Amino acid sequence: MRLFAIGDTHLPSTRGKTMDRFGWTGHPGPLAEAWDRTVKADDGIIVAGDISWATKPAEVTEDLAWLDARPGKKVLLRGNHDYWWGDSAAKLRRLLEPYRSVVGFLHNSAVTVGPYVVAGSRLWTTPQAPPMPGGEMGDERADGGYVEREARRLALSIEDAKKRLQATPGLTRVVAVHFPPLYATATPTVFSELIEGFRPAVCVYGHLHGAEGIAAGFQGEHGGVRYVLASCDAAGFRPVLLLDGPRSTASIAAVAEPGGSPVG
């Protein structure tokens, strides 16, 4: 089984909120075409937050159906714009139950998909973050309380992953988060320290957009972990191949040209 990731799908929800003003022409059409062409039904794919513009569960069902129609076994996590997600794992499980290709979600927990165990959480902007663009698709200000809470949630997810590894020692470790856990300066954060202590093969994240935002995230190897940015425009509007099988790594997809126009 191969493992892919895509972040920041920003699907329109029943609110009909498009991405045209950000230059994402025809979105999510080009993403659907690339996804359907690239990912197979028996592959795994992480959807790394900011899934939908929905603000409540009733508004997200069409977007979940859109995801379900794409090939691959999906693992979902929350982004800062996923207001529909809520705080109850039981309610979220019921909401996602009709969508059979969604095999799990990260909510203070880990998910096993094929030969991989995936841990992670939303995270938040840390004090180590460089200045980044503001606005609706910009960054969120650092907040010590949010960072502390997300560190606890990430730690809980990693602990759950470790329990799964005790039961199935051969699983390949993966971390999936929404906010960048490490920035271009490579200055360690509370999140990168937790992740690198877990020793995953790869850590994938999203959240960053446009040339300036994308440049702010760390991409490459640090502390024995490969960090991959998979937000839609950074990934060229196609799923990023993370792992081509257990314990193997794959190259990072090409970054979109500045301005983030979709690539088919």
Image (tube, rainbow, N blue to C red):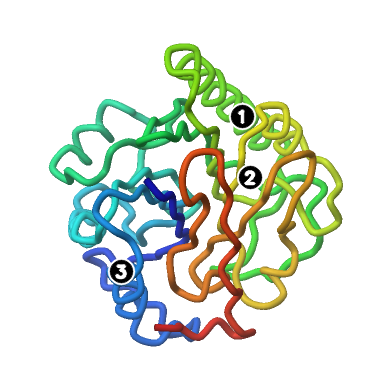
- Check disc 3 and report the residue beneath it: 12
Q: As shown in the figure, which amino acid type bears the numbered disc 1?
A: Arg
How far apart in space, not on screen, are marks 3 and 1 (Cα)? 29 Å
Q: As shown in the figure, which amino acid type bears the numbered disc 2?
A: Trp
Q: Is residue 257 above or below residue 89?
A: below
Residue at image point 26% right, 67% down: 15
Instruction: Tell me where residue 175 sits by quadrant.
Output: top right
Residue 208 lies, in percent from the top left, at: 61, 64
Comes first in the chain, label 2 or label 3: 3
79 with respect to 29 (left or right): right
Q: Is residue 142 above or below residue 106?
A: below
| Callout 3: SS | loop
199 with respect to 253 (left or right): right
How far apart in space, not on screen, are marks 2 and 1 (Cα)? 9 Å
Residue 258 lies, in percent from the top left, at: 64, 84
- Check disc 2 and report the residue beneath it: 124
Q: Nearer the viewer, residue 247 or 104?
A: 247
- Check disc 1 and report the residue beneath it: 149
80 with respect to 30 (left or right): right
Residue at image point 50% right, 81% down: 22
Comes first in the chain, label 2 or label 1: 2
188 with respect to 148 (left or right): right
Residue at image point 41% right, 50% down: 2
Q: Callout 1: few (<14), some (14-19), or many (20+) C-alpha neighbours within 10 Å? A: few
Comes first in the chain, label 3 or label 1: 3
Q: Are marks 3 and 1 in contact (CB under 8 Å)?
A: no
Q: Nearer the viewer, residue 150 or 264?
A: 264
Q: Quadrant of the C terminus?
A: bottom left
Q: Are marks 2 and 1 in contact (CB under 8 Å)?
A: yes
Q: Is residue 226 above or below residue 139?
A: above
Q: As shown in the figure, which amino acid type bears the numbered disc 3?
A: Pro
Residue 54 lies, in percent from the top left, at: 31, 57
